[in-house]
Image (spheres, grey):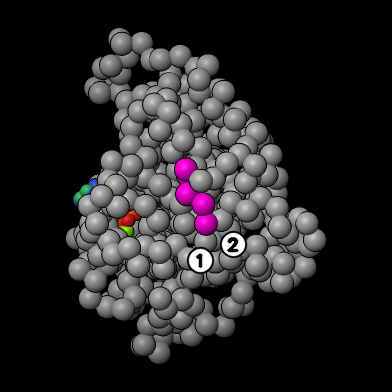
């Protein structure tokens, strides 16, 4: 797996040269507290997934679960450096993003932050009346204009044109927001991916497309979706910047995405940031790929070897942020949902999600009469 190479447009443009002059590692400016917070966010994303898989197995949940295990560094690292006013457009595998948005600086429980609360997200998962979607649709099919989350849909790559539109409107209004879109590598083979990025490139819109390259699009391997070694190579065709991050390393994701975000905010236009990762489980919980055997066992074993929690822990130990017994605590890495137990996670992580779940369980079901709501113009 290639990791931290950069796919520069070979056109000698001023734009490409200027980006190369930016500080290579924005993560070097993070404080110890911020690095530890990133570590905590990795646990939150992992625990959300583990806990929901357990809840689903207990029969307490409806709907499909698209596990993000092993991909948490992409989810956490790409949004940590955003401003409150920036926009995100998550997809099916990005559920933790909804509650992690705008939470930097210990603000997870801050009611005024521009992200969803864990209560709202849990109510969505439990199909309750207090959820943004009011039990109408798939878990991830939510969004919020006021929280600057572009409504997620299942039309692959379909949020990139919406992101380009949001960025265009913001620019016309004199804003300086950046819009981050998320897409699997399979989505990059869609026609709309090309149209939308081309449009964003022509108009130099502040749109950063993060490609979560987890090597598989359902049962299709990446080499049948993309003919070049890196998906980020597609950037060359649009004359924009493309870079490749080690998607298992939260700091590398942060560095590559923040460089692209700063670049976009400065008026230099869009970028593609490809994060190389690996889908640890089947496409959704209905797709047990152990049974189908469409993925070679060796590939799966190898793909799960670099758990993002372990990679982050190692770095924090090297930096002296985690020492002594603390460094050995909460070993959630390398454990699937059936092996991981509550004690593998920091208590504040468990408590945060417990609060969300308690709220969801206490919330009511939507009334049947609501069925026609939002279908026609009210
Ligand atoms: C336009 C479109 N085609 C097909 C599908 C069905 N579908 C849903 S997810 C998926 C695979 C997506 O793969 P990828 O983009 O790599 O994201 P990943 O699931 O791996 O995160 C497919 C084919 C869809 N939702 N939309
Ligand atoms: Mg994929």
Task: Tell me how many marks there are.
Answer: 2
Near-viewer residue (259 or 63): 63
Vertical position of residue 91 compared to residue 312: above or below: above
Residue 331: image x %, image y %? 63, 53
Q: Is residue 149 visible?
A: no
**Image spot of residue 287 (x, y percent):** 27, 46
Mark 2, residue position:
310
Residue 135 x %, y %: 36, 24
Location of the N terminus by quadrant is bottom left
- Look at the picture and state if 156 lies above or below 201: above
Stretch of the chain drawn in magenta: 334-338
Q: Secondary structure at mark 2?
A: helix
What residue lies at 46% left-to-right and 76% top-to-bottom? 3
Mark 1 = which residue? 306
Q: Quadrant of the C terminus?
A: top left
Q: CA distance from mark 2 to mark 1?
A: 7 Å
Please say if the residues under marks 2 and 1 sit with CB atoms less than 8 Å apart.
Answer: yes
Residue 284 drawn above or below residue 250: above
Percent across and percent down for residue 22 are 58, 78
User: Crowdedness of circle 2 by 10 Å Cα count: few (<14), some, many (20+)?
Assistant: some
Residue occupying the far bottom of the picture:
12
């Amino acid at each position: 797996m290639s990791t931290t190479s950069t796919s520069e447009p070979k056109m000698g443009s001023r734009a490409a040269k200027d980006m190369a002059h930016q500080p290579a590692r924005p993560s070097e400016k993070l404080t110890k507290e911020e690095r530890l917070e990133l570590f905590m966010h990795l646990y939150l994303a992992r625990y959300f997934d583990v806990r929901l898989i357990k809840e689903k197995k207990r029969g307490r949940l409806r709907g499909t679960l698209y596990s993000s295990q092993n991909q948490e560094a992409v989810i956490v690292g790409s949004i940590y450096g955003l401003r409150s006013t920036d926009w995100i457009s998550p997809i099916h595998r990005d559920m933790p993003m909804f509650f992690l948005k705008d939470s930097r600086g210990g603000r997870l429980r801050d009611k005024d932050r521009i992200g969803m609360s864990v209560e709202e997200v849990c109510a969505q998962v439990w199909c309750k009346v207090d959820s943004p979607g009011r039990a109408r649709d798939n878990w991830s099919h939510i969004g919020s204009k006021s929280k600057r989350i572009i409504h997620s849909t299942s039309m692959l790559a379909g949020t990139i044109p919406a992101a380009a539109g949001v960025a265009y409107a913001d620019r016309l209004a004199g804003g300086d927001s950046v819009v981050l879109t998320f897409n699997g590598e399979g989505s990059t083979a869609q026609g709309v991916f090309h149209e939308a990025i081309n449009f964003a490139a022509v108009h130099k819109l502040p749109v950063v497309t993060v490609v979560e390259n987890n090597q598989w699009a359902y049962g299709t391997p990446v080499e049948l979706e993309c003919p070049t070694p890196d998906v980020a190579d597609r950037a060359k065709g649009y004359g924009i910047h493309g870079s490749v991050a080690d998607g298992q390393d939260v700091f590398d994701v942060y560095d590559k995405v923040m460089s692209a975000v700063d670049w976009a905010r400065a008026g230099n236009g869009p970028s593609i940031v490809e994060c190389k990762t690996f889908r640890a489980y089947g496409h959704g919980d209905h797709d047990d790929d152990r049974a189908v055997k469409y993925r070679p066992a060796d590939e799966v074993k190898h793909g799960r070897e670099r758990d993002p929690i372990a990679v982050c822990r190692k770095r924090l130990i090297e930096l002296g942020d985690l020492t002594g017994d603390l460094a050995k605590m909460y070993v959630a890495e390398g454990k699937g949902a059936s092996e991981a137990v509550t004690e593998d996670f920091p208590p504040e992580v468990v408590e945060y999600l417990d609060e969300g779940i308690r709220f969801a369980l206490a919330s009511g079901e939507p009334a049947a009469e609501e069925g026609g709501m939002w279908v026609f113009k009210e």
